[in-house]
Amino acid sequence: MKRFLLFLPLIAFVLVGVFLYKGLSMNPSARESALLGKPMPEFSLPNLHDPLQQITHENLLGDVFILNVWGSWCPSCYDEHNEIVRMAQMGVPIVGLNYKDERSKAFRYLAQLGNPYSVVLFEEDGLRELAFNLGVYGAPETFLFDRDGIVRYHLAGVITPQLVDEVIMPEVRKWQAKR
Amino acid sequence: MASKALIFYRTLSLFMFVLLVLFASSSYAAIELYDFTDDSYQARYKDVGGKLRCPKCENQSIADSNSPSAYDMRQELYRLLEEGKTDSQIYDFMVSRFGDYVLYEPPMRKDTWLLWYLPPALVVLGLLLAFFLVRSRSSAKPAITLSASERQARIQQILELEKESS
């Protein structure tokens, strides 16, 4: 017993060491969205390409789709754009949410990189209509909605080819197969 | 000569004063004007704003952060206060969008009890350990018990030693 007590500090040190070492490799900004399993918030936003057309949550429901939050001011959005295009080519409807941007800059962005979006919602800076209620705190962010408009997957950060092939597309197919 | 030095120091101190005035306030993160309809809202705005964590910047409250998401949250905080919402309603509103992450003080739940109780439990454990260690050490030298005759013999021995030395 006495012997064992002598080793107690060493054991405690090793335990704390392992715990802290694990913490070093953790990504502090990776966390689960509070919206997972929750329905799409109600909203009404203009179409980027047609300011007079208001789009609401009801217009989007019925099919599995991806919502991609982007802005021309966001460098990482340029990085992931190819992957958005690739997913669109695989037949996934992708709704864009142009976030804290200006129309003219958004048009330039799409003209330069191509427009993979079935529709782009335009949320002006200062408007907290949809992105805020989705818990968006930056761009890019990507959400997957099922047929009932429930959030099934969320990513805060850049979509990589690996993520598309190994996570996002399997999720899309899974929720498309339901019912 | 002395007056030249004086002028130099005067100019220098004036220059530094101007620098100080110009840049002193730039360290304040969020300068926005809010018109509260109730005086108590202002104190609660400060209090709640300091307890909500900015989602974009891990180590800042929304009151401290310059990020656009923190700005949005302050705007919503102001709106909710003006709507007469209670503090807990405001926290729930933020958590339902940004998760528990935004609370600097985590909620007490089944999956967070370790977070709350482990540190005090470790302190208690440490105190107990220290207490028992100290007690076992003080009682480590067991008192030697002698029988009456042994005691007499020992006393005799000591007395003889005393005699010899003196």
Image: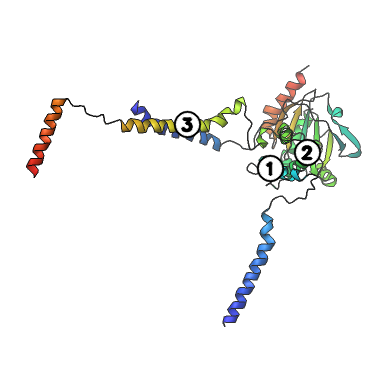
| Residue B138 x, y percent position in the rendering | 31, 33
Seen as rendered, the residue at the extreme right is A52
Q: Which colour assignment does the render follow?
A: rainbow
Same-subunit check for callouts 1 and 3: yes
Please, what is the three-letter code of the amino acid marked with disc 1?
Asp
**Disc number for residue A13:** none
Please tell me whether mark 2 sits on a helix, a strand or a loop.
Answer: helix
Please, what is the three-letter code of the amino acid marked with disc 3?
Val
Residue placed most toward the observer, B12 or B150: B150
- Label 3 crowd bin: few (<14), some (14–19), many (20+), radius 10 Å: few
Please state the chain letter of the residue tagged with numbered disc 2 in the rendered image: B
Residue placed most toward the observer, A21 or B87: B87
Same-subunit check for callouts 2 and 3: yes
Q: Which quadrant holds the C terminus of chain A? A: top right
Q: Is residue B51 left or right of residue A122?
A: left
- Whichever of labels 1 and 2 marks the residue nearer the N terminus, that label is 1
**Disc number for residue B80:** 2
- Label 1 crowd bin: few (<14), some (14–19), many (20+), radius 10 Å: few
Please tell me whether mark 1 sits on a helix, a strand or a loop.
Answer: helix
Residue A150 visible in the current orientation: yes
What residue is shown with label 3?
A: B124
Quadrant of residue B132 within the rendered picture: top left
| Residue A156 x, y percent position in the rendering | 70, 36
Give the CA separation, mark 1 to mark 2.
Answer: 14 Å
Is residue B110 shown above or below A85? above
Seen as rendered, the residue at the extreme bottom is B1
- Whichever of labels 1 and 3 marks the residue nearer the N terminus, that label is 1
Same-subunit check for callouts 1 and 2: yes
Q: Is residue B127 left or right of residue A177?
A: left
Discs 2, 3 touching: Cβ within 8 Å: no
Give the CA separation, mark 1 to mark 3.
Answer: 32 Å
